[in-house]
Image (cartoon, rainbow, N blue to C red):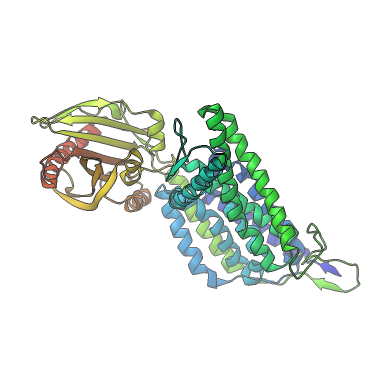
Amino acid sequence: MKIVDRPGVKNRMWVRILALSTCFALAYWVPLKAMVSIWLTDEEYSYGFLIPMVSIYFLWEKKDVLRTMPLKGAWVFFPALFSFVLLSLYGVLGSSGNIAMPAVPILIVLFAAFCFGKEAMKELLLPLGFLIFMVPVPPIIERYLGVILKGISSKMGGMIIDLFNIPVHVSGNVIDLGVTQLQVVDACSGMRYLFALFALGVVYAYFFERVTWKRIAAVLSTIPIAVITNGVRIGITGLLTDKYGVTVAEGFFHGFSGWVLFMVAFGCLFIVGRVLALFPPKERWTLRGKGGKGAATGDSEASVPGPERSNLNGPFVVSVCLLIVVAALSLSTKAMPPVKIEGGLSRFPTVFAGWQGKAETVDPEIVIRSGAEESYSGFYENEKKEGVSLYLGYRSSAFLSNENFFHSPTVCLPSQGWKIGGESTRIIMDVPKFGHLKVSRLIMENMDRKQLVYFWFQTKDKTTYDKNINRFHLSIHALKRDNTYDFFIRPITPIYPGESVGDAEKRLDGFTRSMMGTLFVFLDQHRQTE
């Protein structure tokens, strides 16, 4: 059977696809660039470059089906598309890589569905949906699911070590070998490992399985395979550490063992395929070829006309207009000059309104990981020798200039051994410029020590206790084009023995009022636009 194309229609379709692709790349240049940067700098995501290539191959395999398929714009997808466009704008303008980057593959699928219709979407869902694997795992998923995976992997590693009669105690994500302790950190949780293997499972199922339930089983089998192999990796690391020392757990072996066990996991996936072949329906196990589903074969005299392309102009024009608006907003915002502090934030005053302090050194690596471009840390005392620690994080240009964002103390302080004894909000009255200031309030406990923590996020003229609201403020500033800088502010005071929480609150409220007045004077004197 031969497929007869109508050259004019075919050329117009390629022009439309090229136009949409170009507009999309311009509109989402910021998150696309951020993803590529992560692929280049984080070896655990270096596979990201392969994902678009695999997706293109999947599309190429569908070419014959798509050439003969009626294409028709589907307005039913427009509400979902428009909602995700707004969400993506919030992510880009509000400096949320966790939203902007995952939105990219979802938007690609929605634009394709809107412009080419439901029938085409059935064939395009796998090739375009596969692009989700090019997105780095959002920290919020890695943080919560990673905790579970770390616990499982740690227990499995401890069991393997115990099999060799080596005394071991596992507590949470810490493997205690007596003299040496191994901590299963986030990077070793297996979360990223699982994500990459899951993508590999999809590829394997596409090429080597024909039955739907077997494809699903093959893909889902990657979850236990990833967990088990990561547990084995941790167990082997513990065995070698016990025999050769802690250095074996770092450097070359740490990276090399990951690659070796990934190949082992891939081998396990083929074993799963052999087991699935034992169940009906039984088919000959071969690599997917051109004679597969959807391929046009044979040379019969019958011909099939090219696909009917109707009702495409409206969705195409609307899509291009949406992308042009997003591109104009995101690229123009990215071009807005950052607001620098002359001489740096380290020049923040150490004496103000009854408080006298001393600046403290902050490790530059910690500054970067915290999501700030620069920071200030100082310890202040009043005339009663009551202390307050102050941390200021500053971003001169908040719009994804750093893929991280300000880290909340609810994450950072517990990692230092502090437990949250109470969490709420508090309104501080009579604050300069703002009148009242609503902040997040934490009571942190560590052994017999307690401390009171306030923190909030602050732009040019808006404050909030919530990070997501702060991103919304940044988006509003971007639309108004009146600000780019962003602050994270965190004062901490001890709750001294015999002192009530109310006493600590009065002290920290007073410090906040004095500090805020000083901060505004400092910004007015040292703020400069590049």
Q: Quadrant of the N terminus?
A: bottom right
Q: Does 349 sit above or below residue 165?
A: above
Nearer to the camera, 520 or 151: 151
Q: Does 112 sit above or below residue 92?
A: below
Q: Does 85 sit above or below residue 77?
A: above
Please state the horizontal and vertical placement of residue 44, each as a whole percent of the image: 57, 41
Q: Which residue: 48% across, 69% down?
A: 79
Using the rendered image of the protein, determine whether residue 228 is visible from the camera's viewpoint: yes
Q: Is residue 384 left or right of residue 310?
A: left
Q: Give the total of numbered labels.
A: 0
Q: Which residue: 75% across, 69% down?
A: 68
Please state the horizontal and vertical placement of residue 224, each as a whole percent of the image: 58, 55
Nearer to the camera, 71 or 62: 62
Nearer to the camera, 227 or 309: 227
Please state the horizontal and vertical placement of residue 155, each as a whole percent of the image: 49, 47
Q: Quadrant of the C terminus?
A: top left
